[in-house]
Amino acid sequence: MKYKTIEELDARIERIIKKTVQSYYTDWKNYDRPKYMGLKGSKDRKDRIAVLIARKCGTYLLTLDEIEKRESAAAIYEYYYQQEATSSNYYLINLDRLEIGRINQPDIYIKAMKAA
């Protein structure tokens, strides 16, 4: 979904977190929200597209660049879509376009991203 302002996008992300995360909210509060704020302020193109993994037990925020170039980030991305019991929800955030959308098939999405 596309938003008119960054504040509307921020509010949508906060609603996703509030609706999904039942424990370890501190993942978002202490780590991923500050990272998100840094990404918003970055002018580096590689920081402008990120994946939010919202789970019942915490969050992860990874840029596409991190998933592509860091084995640990790729492992996190892949681990949670393989664990159906965790009820992980994946969202693609584009800060330049002020968009967020759910990634319904993260396994297919990552394969397509690696092929591009």
Image (tube, rainbow, N blue to C red):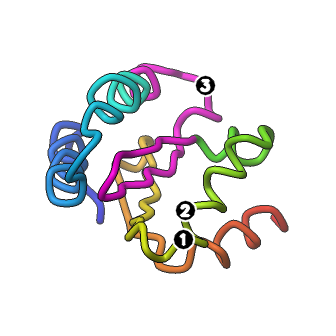
Q: Earlier in the sequence, mark 3 or mark 1?
A: 3
Q: Residue at x 36, y 22 (%)?
A: 34
Q: Give me the residue at 52% from left, 38% from top.
A: 48
Q: Secondary structure at mark 1?
A: loop
Reply above or below: 92 against 73.
below
The magenta segment is 38-62
Residue pictured at 42% horizontal, 60% vertical: 91
Q: Position of residue 73 (x, y in %)?
A: 67, 43
- Does the image show residue 4? no
Q: Are marks 2 and 3 in contact (CB under 8 Å)?
A: no
Classed neighbour count for the residue bearing mark 3: other residues with Cα under 10 Å, few (<14), some (14–19), many (≥20): few
Q: Which residue is mark 2?
A: 80
Do tag 3 and tag 1 residues touch (Cβ < 8 Å)?
A: no
| Left or right, 10 with reference to 47 | left
Image quadrant assignment for residue 11: top left
Between residue 85 and residue 42, name the one nearer to us: 85
User: Closer to the camera, 25 or 49?
Assistant: 25
Q: Classify residue 20 as left or right of residue 37.
A: left
Is residue 7 placed above or below 107 in the rendered structure? above
Question: Which image quadrant for residue 7?
Answer: top left
Q: Secondary structure at mark 3?
A: loop
Expressed as whole percent of the image width and height from the top left, the position of residue 105 reads 55, 79
> x, y (%) of residue 35?
43, 25
Would you name the residue on which mark 1 appears? 83
Amino acid type, label 1: Gln
What residue do we see at 39% from left, 32% from top?
32
The disc placed on residue 44 is 3
Which numbered disc flags the more N-terminal residue, 2 or 3?
Answer: 3
